[in-house]
Image: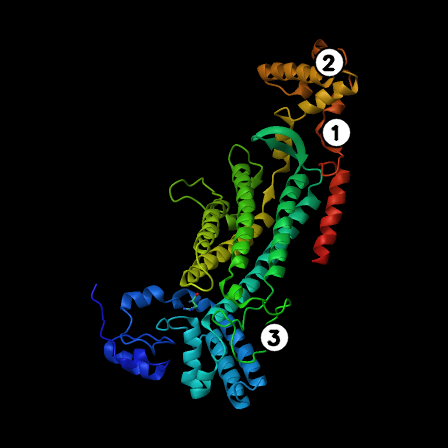
Amino acid sequence: MKRKMKYPAFMGRECVLPMNALLGKEIGYYMAQLWGGRFAAATDEEAYEFNASISFDKRLVREDIEGSLAHAEMLSRRGIISKEDGEQIGKGLKEILSDVESGKLSVSPEYEDVHSFVEATLTDRIGDAGKRLHTGRSRNDQVALDMKLYAKRMAGQTDEALRDILSVLLHIMEENLDTYMPGFTHLQKAQPVTLAHHMGAYFEMFLRDRGRIGDLMRRMDTCPLGSGALAGTTYPLDRAFTAEKLGFSGGPTRNSMDSVSDRDYLIEFLSAMSLIMMHLSRFSEEIIIWNSNEYRFIEIDDRFSTGSSIMPQKKNPDIAELVRGKTGRVYGALMSLLTVMKGIPLAYDKDMQEDKEVFFDAVDTVNSSLRLFTGMLSTLRFRKDIMEKSARNGFSNATDAADYLVGKGVPFRDAHGAVGRLVLRCIAENKALDDLTMEEWKAESQAFDEDIYEAISLKTCVERRLTEGAPGREPMEKCIDYYKSYLADA
Ligand code: ARG
């Protein structure tokens, strides 16, 4: 690769964008960075690219400007910059933000990072006052702040998406208190449950996920701005003011070195997101199985399934498969950031720039997976008839037959053996326990009587399961009441 190493002198200046732009035209490209005074030679072009983060940190532009607005207001209130400069900076920053949001101004790639973009554009627009913005601040506390603000905003979105999936699950539960289906262990029919009960298991998972998001939001609610590069500053900053202005209810962070080097909140968030994906992935797996030709428990709405280019009969559960597949990249992001952080000395090191792409990718993946999965779930059609039929076959009432004998005084181990032999017989004759004649029951144990049929009916099997957390109507209704008041509160 041919390198353009001959940079003109502008690289040795501090943020002179108009001139950069001019000179850039002469040499074919230019770069804008905030430093350079102590450099005699320009950065190698490939090294510059390698170092630059603008291609991905441009998504922090809103947070960067919000942080700068608060910082500038504080500087002016404390008399560190003049009132006029403070006002000019505030006005200029607001204009940049509105121009970026309206699409009038784009965060262009020739800047080293989003911070350089904002400061250089500001200086370009308002002149010298713009150069005072960075007083008492470092990009280290600036980027720590931007990431925290962004993570807080994203956590809010994740929380909302979790709330949405919980409401959909609650709705399905309310409608299916007596939709019987087989419960599985080892993917083998085990005991009958209801669809409400099965959905309730996922409700619990996403409820815990929401709890985790709430916990980490509380923990990340402290403001690193004002920590400087690592050791605070000599300017009389009002850190409490900026923390409050930026909505950090925990006030300013307590240790400036920790503030610029802490990425725990991102790791916690990635860990919570990994769990969300794990839950979504298990749910996806069940959707895929239930949607298979063999099960046919559900039908996925056309809006959330796709076809095959060759097999005209196909209707595939692609959304569920993709959610299951995308789980890997979120786990990958968690591993990646844990590994980035594990060996770096205090305080800030450039390694930490690696937090962004993985975090952005993970948060996009989780929030879109949650939204799409919720859409698919809310439009699923449950084939209650097929679910119920499946619960009747497969001996999911065998435990209840054994429990019946226990009720008649037979020791459980003997009852287990007797019913096991009856199951073997039914398998050979290709029938269900419910199809056995009274003679056949009696041949195994005299303790069986006419009431065995009622005792092993699906309804009885489910309705007699009344322990807390079981699928019987009473415990389920109690659960639903709790979920309802939970969702009403939050
Ligand atoms: N792009 C950098 C990051 O993401 C911003 C902080 C730069 N600080 C520095 N000392 N070079 O971490």
Q: Is residue 79 above or below residue 287?
A: below
Q: Nearer the viewer, residue 442 or 324?
A: 324
Q: Using the numbered discs, state the Cα–Cα distance from disc 1 to disc 2 in whole angstroms.
A: 19 Å
Q: Using the numbered discs, state the Cα–Cα distance from disc 3 to disc 2 in whole angstroms.
A: 78 Å
Q: Where is residue 479? Give x, y as percent.
A: 73, 44
Ligand 1 contact, mark 1 (Cβ < 8 Å): no
**CB atoms at circles 3 and 2 under 8 Å apart?**
no
**Which residue carries the number 3 mark?**
245
Label 3: how many residues lie within 10 Å, few (<14), some (14-19) or many (20+)?
A: some
**Which residue carries the number 2 mark?**
438
**Which residue carries the number 1 mark?**
460
Q: Where is residue 224? Give x, y as percent.
A: 55, 68
The residue that appears at 71% across and 17% down in the rendered structure is 415
Ligand 1 contact, mark 3 (Cβ < 8 Å): no
Q: Quadrant of ligand 1?
A: bottom left
Coloration of the structure image: rainbow
User: Residue reaching furthest top?
Assistant: 443
State which mark lies toward you, 1 or 2: 1
Earlier residue among tags 1 and 2: 2
Does residue 137 show up?
yes
Label 1: how many residues lie within 10 Å, few (<14), some (14-19) or many (20+)?
A: some
Circle 3 SS class? helix
Under mark 2, the amino acid is Met
The residue that appears at 71% across and 20% down in the rendered structure is 402
From the viewer's perspective, is 288 left or right of 50? right
State which mark lies toward you, 3 or 1: 3
Under mark 1, the amino acid is Thr
The residue that appears at 32% across and 84% down in the rendered structure is 19
Label 2: how many residues lie within 10 Å, few (<14), some (14-19) or many (20+)?
A: few
